[in-house]
Amino acid sequence: MTLITGGFGGIGQTIAQDLAQKGGAKLVLTTRGATGSARVEAAVRQLEELGAEVLAVRAEVTSPEDMRRVVDEARARFGSLDVVMHAAGVTRDALIATKTDDDSWDVLAPKLLGTQALVSALAEHPAKQTVLFSSTSSVIGAAGQADYVAANEYLNAVARSAPAALGQVLAVNWGVWADAGMAARAAGLDRPASDAIVAPVGRPLLDDSQPMPGDASSASSCASKTGSSADTARLRGRR
């Protein structure tokens, strides 16, 4: 079973659809909005049509109490928690001199407090594997993204420290996704989660570098890519 935070965002839905297409996926997707909204219900139906079992849970990812509830509901529904994909995130691009504290905290909170909430929620029963969705911004340091850079470098640091609650932990420094996510949305290139899938979207880093749950090589491959050093704790996105 896979838990995806930010599961109804562009990247969360892309990952969920990829897992659903592989067959036998059991997915728990979090959203800050109502699970009964037309957009969420349409996304759930689409995933179910692809063969996945889906549980949508309304939760604030920064809340330890909410994330403990999500984990409890996930285990009650599916019995185990194999993989956590922490894909929640927000951007507020602007020069630091023009930002308020609230603007910056909106960006920091999902990745910083969200990760801490997951560690707390999984403390007694750790996940087998956790993938933290970081960004090449932590390497590039793009203008207007001081808070976003800091948030993603925090994820990289967590991957290096490898908290026991997260199991085998990997931070992936994604570049800009062509058709999903915050950057694509800013450029008007993203597609709504309810859009029909015309063909599977190729994600070489997902398929080759990070085997999905159910792949027999997943455990050994992940183990070879995690560890205490920065080079083995994260991969740099190529898209």
Image (cartoon, rainbow, N blue to C red):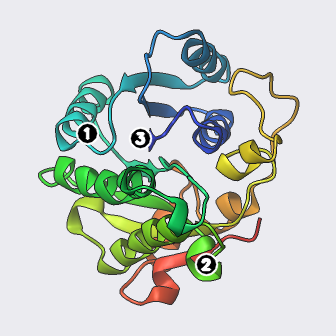
Is 138 on the left or on the right of 170, as rendered?
A: right
Q: Is residue 4 visible?
A: yes
Disc 1 and disc 3 in contact, CB within 8 angstroms: no
Residue nearest the viewer, comparing 31 with 122 = 31
Quadrant in the rendering for residue 108 = bottom left
Vertically, is 72 above or below 98? above
Q: CA distance from mark 3 to mark 2?
A: 29 Å
Q: Which residue is mark 1?
A: 67
Quadrant in the rendering for residue 16 = top right
The x and y percentages for residue 83 are 41, 50
Q: Earlier in the sequence, mark 3 or mark 2?
A: 3
As shown in the figure, which amino acid type bears the numbered disc 2?
Answer: Gly
Residue 8, labelled with which disc? none
- Residue at 45 percent across and 79 percent down: it is 233
- Residue at 41 percent across and 29 percent down: it is 32
As shown in the figure, which amino acid type bears the numbered disc 1?
Answer: Met
Q: Residue furthest front?
A: 98
- Residue at 22 percent across and 67 percent down: it is 164
Quadrant occupied by the N terminus: top left
Q: Is residue 217 visible?
A: no
The x and y percentages for residue 74 are 30, 31
Q: Which residue is mark 2?
A: 141
Residue 3, labelled with which disc? 3
